[in-house]
Image (cartoon, rainbow, N blue to C red):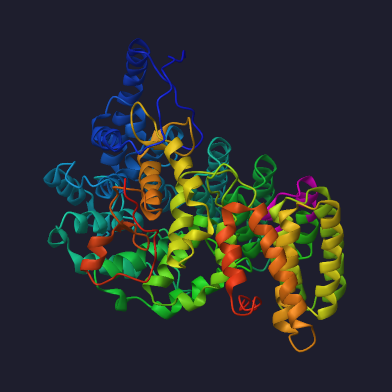
Amino acid sequence: MHGIKRARLTEEEREARRRRELSKIDEFTKLSDATLARKKERDWSRDAFDLTTLLLQINPEFYTIWNYRRLILLNGLFVNVPAELVKDILLDELGMTMSALKAHPKVYWIWNHRRWCLEQIPYGPGQESESHYAGWKQTAWDRELTVAEKMLDVDARNFHAWGYRRYVLDSMPNPRPESNELIYTARKIEANFSNFSAWHQRSKALASLWTQGKLDESKSREDEFELLRNAMYTDPNDQSVWIYHRWLVGTESSREILEREIVAIQELLDEQPDSKWCLESISYYKRLLLNKYTSEVDVNVLSEEIRSLLDRLETLDPARQRRYQDLRKRKRVGTDLQQKNW
Amino acid sequence: MTTVTKPNLATDKLLTDLHVKYIQNLGENKDDLMYHLTAHLRLNAIYWGLTALCVLGRPDALNREEMIEFVMSCWDEEAGGFGAHPDHDAHIHPTLSAIQILIMQNALDRMDVDRVVKFIVSLQQPSGVFAGDRWGETDTRFLYCAVNGLSLLGRLDEMNKDKAVEYIQRCRNYDGGFGSSVGAESHAAQVFVCVAALTILDRLDVVDVDTLGWWLSERQLPNGGLNGRPEKLEDVCYSFWVLSALSILNKVPWIDAEMLSSFILSAQDPEGGGIADRPGDMVDVFHTLFGVAGLSILGYPGLVDLDPVYCMPATFIGARGLRKGWQALSRRQA
């Protein structure tokens, strides 16, 4: 029962609710029993299909009924009908699941059914030799991207919608250039810096573009640092920004970048002396510096600076004090950084 | 609807008797529409209820024979697995619940183990991940269900372990966490399933302990509750997802146990029993288990030890020789 307020009912109210629910329960159990009985009989008729529609409108979590619905489509409604009709039925299915999703945006089974429908859309119109042979598929998949994005307009952190969007982007017949992701995620981030889902997606898109050589890595890294600089100053307490910053710096950064970022965050810290995330990030990058450039830095000075940062964090963020103490107690304060590079 | 004001009932202590009664009454709610609308989760709910009762020290509070009969009535003969309810289709999640319930009731002999193993193994995909059922939805949650179930049945060698580990590795993000599929954002519940599966597979070397420990500890919010992702709201169920992973990494002290305990306790319903997602909300058996499970890991007095890897009472796991190196906080005296 996520997010439903507890109500204290009087005896009378409870009784009134019970009476109200009784007829609904009766309706639901009858429908449910009738549909499951048809499933047992392997009834693949349009009648049975309509029963599943009714039942799923009441309860979209009833996974067995979604399964039955697909069996009816495969063994009944799709049999001996032209491809165009199969396509039309599937488009109706997508319409039906769309209204279900609007009411229940986090029900796995609805998203699954949608995927299944998409994957079933036949080739057409026309013959294989014709240019628009993949037309139905393309139209349907293109529209799915819009659907996922509409769901993200309503709830920008819905991980079902993000996952579905990634799936559509990976599987659509006419793929979008990956660089589009930079535009989309920038838009989501600008709407709300706290949207870590968008930062996450951005990190994946950038890493992929860099690996494929489609984007100048060092220049684009600098652009990202610039974007982060704005975000940090907007809300220095926002985890999303700092976690992304940690990704951007990575574990392979040059000494110059590490030192430059430490200085930049220090400037913000000077303005916001109690910023936990400034302290946490500086202490992390200093540990990285110590660990990676041991022979080039003054180990004693840096270790002492790290210890003093951890002391301040311990006071400022008592809930996590044991973590700071543990880091401080290590023989050399930089040795927690065995982060693998991926 | 009017609200009847009652004197402010204390929720600073665990209301064990009320929770036991709440769970016992769950099967009596047939006048409640919600009871019928949650039939697709019935077997899971029985696992949640029974495990909560075991942790509360009242393993016999529900009728054993009735429970075993119900589990067996969920068997899907065609697929060779368990559905969540009689006449519902087999799926890996209720199948795991069936295995867990029968083990807790010492009744595994009732199950056709070979067929169940065959069903689970058949769901592994070439990538190493598992599907939930024949319809092919994949998720690291299902991978965990498979690894947990096969391990409990002593048949882990029948799946492709290397491929499963390889898939989990591909789901790992730079923040140390794991997502539901390759490319997905880290999420505390997915961190639990991936870390617990790696633990069972003896491959914790895949985990970057310090980075993940840091990410997990940052799930705690100023009100003591834990969230599942950065910049999201707290929820009692994350008490378990985050704590189980922390205890496997031996990092439970990296959060404030007292603050979290108070948060979980404040989400109790002091009248009807049960625990909600957050204070003042409707309770359910899912959050009741994960609240109680969290408190057990935090060493709350009087509770029974829970194995965070399998989310079952530790004695059952120890008896099967499956105890791994996790560490909960020491049990405090009342």
Instruction: Locate residue B86: give its quadrant.
Output: top left
Residue A246: say if magenta.
no
Q: Main secondary structure of the magenta part?
A: helix
Q: Is residue B159 left or right of residue A299?
A: left
Q: Residue at x 26, y 74 (%)?
A: B155
Q: Residue at x 81, y 59 (%)?
A: A228
Judge by depth and name the residue closer to the eye, B268 or A68.
B268
- Vertical placement of residue A244 versus B31, above or below: below
Q: How many marks?
A: 0
Q: Is residue A127 visible?
A: no
User: Residue B145's x, y, as percent?
Assistant: 37, 62
Farthest residue toward the top?
Answer: A12
A55 or B61, which lies in front? B61
Q: Is the residue B164 above or below the residue B80 in the image?
A: below
User: Looking at the image, is A187 positioned above or below residue A339?
Assistant: above
Q: Nearer the viewer, residue B124 or B25?
A: B25
B47 w.r.t. A4: above or below:
below
Q: Position of residue A303 (x, y in %)?
A: 71, 76
Asked if residue A152 lies left or right of residue B26, the reply is right
Q: Tell me where the magenta segment starts and ends, as one range.
A: A186-201
What quarter of the picture does the C terminus of chain B occupy? top left
Give how far across and how far down residue A36 sits, in percent: 29, 41
Residue B94 can be seen, yes or no: yes
Image-based side of A160 in relation to A268, left or right: left
